[in-house]
């Protein structure tokens, strides 16, 4: 798919440097194992940009955060760029748009084939020379980082924020609206033209490994599960199921007053996540 057909004229908030050695973010397209072009932005972090605001917390050499956004997000969304800006105080950051989102090609499968997109991003991070890779996912991206770690490995720590534990959950009004968006033709039109998200019309076949089934396979990789006690999409039984499945290799943070995903994760929480990741990744 061409960049023009995938992008719908999205205005970028990232300077699109090519791979020329110029300091600053590098924007490029990755190719997934099934041939989808994935829009990505690599920020080399404080090693390039110079002194940090907080010199007491130096960057971790060789560390890169690979950020997996939530459904209807993309690399140009302000909340994704804000998360990346906080994480870059502790290491390099690679963000990307899942298939069907923003300028990326293909159509969203709402958490199934997206594991191939994350695999391409992690491979890109390794090819850039990073010795430690931490995946950080939000909502749909939170489920994808769990499945990626279970199916592919190759990461040094995993952070899943506001993720579901099981598929087909319709117990809250936001999730019932999301299922309408995904399963109805008129909903997919709203997704395409109103939310810049192109959704595949086919049902899952086969149904992918669920997040709670994936979690036991992640050990011994360190795992952090973060969830707000005011999450309007997934109530607290979801993170508790994930934490129980993780056992001793997982850690659960239930955040008081927090809602759902990137928009609800303030800078202080993202900074704590970064500090946990630096320690957990070794």
Image (cartoon, rainbow, N blue to C red):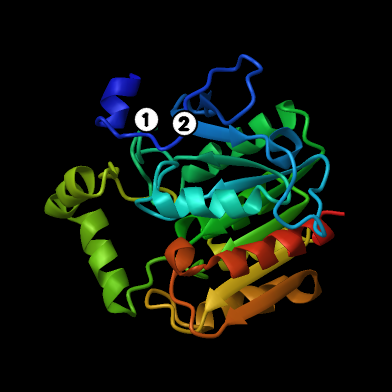
State the image coordinates of residue 70 (x, y, percent, origin top left): 44, 55
Q: Which residue is mark 1?
A: 105
Is 151 positioned to the left or the right of 263 in the image?
Answer: right
Q: Is residue 240 above or below residue 84?
A: below
State the image coordinates of residue 36 (x, y, percent, origin top left): 44, 28
> Which residue is rendered at x = 60% and y = 81% of the image?
254
Q: Which residue is mark 2?
A: 38
Is 138 positioned to the left or the right of 152 in the image?
Answer: left
Numbered badge on residue 219: none
Q: Is residue 25 above or below residue 111?
A: above
The local secondary structure at tag 1 comes to: loop
- Quadrant of the frame with the N terminus: top left
Q: Which residue is farthest top?
A: 20
State the image coordinates of residue 164 (x, y, percent, origin top left): 48, 68
The answer to whether the residues at label 1 and label 2 have Cβ atoms under 8 Å apart is yes
| Mark 2, other Cα within 10 Å: few <14 / some 14–19 / many ≥20 | many
């Amino acid at each position: 798919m061409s960049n023009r057909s995938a992008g719908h004229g999205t205005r970028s908030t990232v300077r699109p440097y090519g791979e020329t050695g110029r300091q600053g973010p590098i924007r490029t397209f990755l190719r997934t194992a099934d041939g989808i072009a994935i829009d990505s932005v690599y920020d080399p972090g404080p090693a390039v940009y110079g002194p940090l605001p907080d010199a007491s917390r130096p960057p971790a050499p060789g560390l890169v955060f690979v950020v997996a956004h939530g459904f209807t997000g993309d690399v140009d969304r302000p909340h994704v760029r804000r998360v990346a800006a906080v994480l870059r105080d502790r290491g390099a950051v690679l963000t990307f748009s899942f298939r069907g989102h923003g300028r990326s090609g293909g159509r969203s499968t709402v958490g199934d084939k997206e594991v191939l997109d994350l695999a391409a991003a992690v491979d890109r991070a390794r090819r850039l020379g990073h010795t430690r890779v931490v995946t950080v996912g939000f909502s749909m991206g939170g489920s994808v980082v769990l499945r990626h770690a279970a199916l592919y490995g190759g990461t040094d720590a995993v952070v899943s924020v506001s993720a579901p534990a099981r598929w087909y959950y319709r117990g809250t009004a936001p999730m019932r609206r999301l299922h309408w968006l995904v399963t109805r033709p008129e909903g997919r039109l709203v997704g395409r033209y109103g939310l810049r998200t192109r959704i595949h019309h086919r049902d899952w076949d086969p149904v992918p490994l669920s997040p709670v089934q994936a979690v036991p396979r992640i050990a011994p990789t360190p795992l952090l599960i973060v969830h707000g006690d005011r999450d309007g999409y997934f109530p607290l039984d979801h993170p508790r199921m994930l934490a129980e499945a993780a056992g001793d290799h997982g850690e659960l943070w239930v955040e008081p007053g927090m809602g759902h995903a990137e928009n609800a994760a303030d800078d202080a929480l993202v900074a704590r996540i970064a500090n946990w990741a630096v320690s957990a990744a070794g």
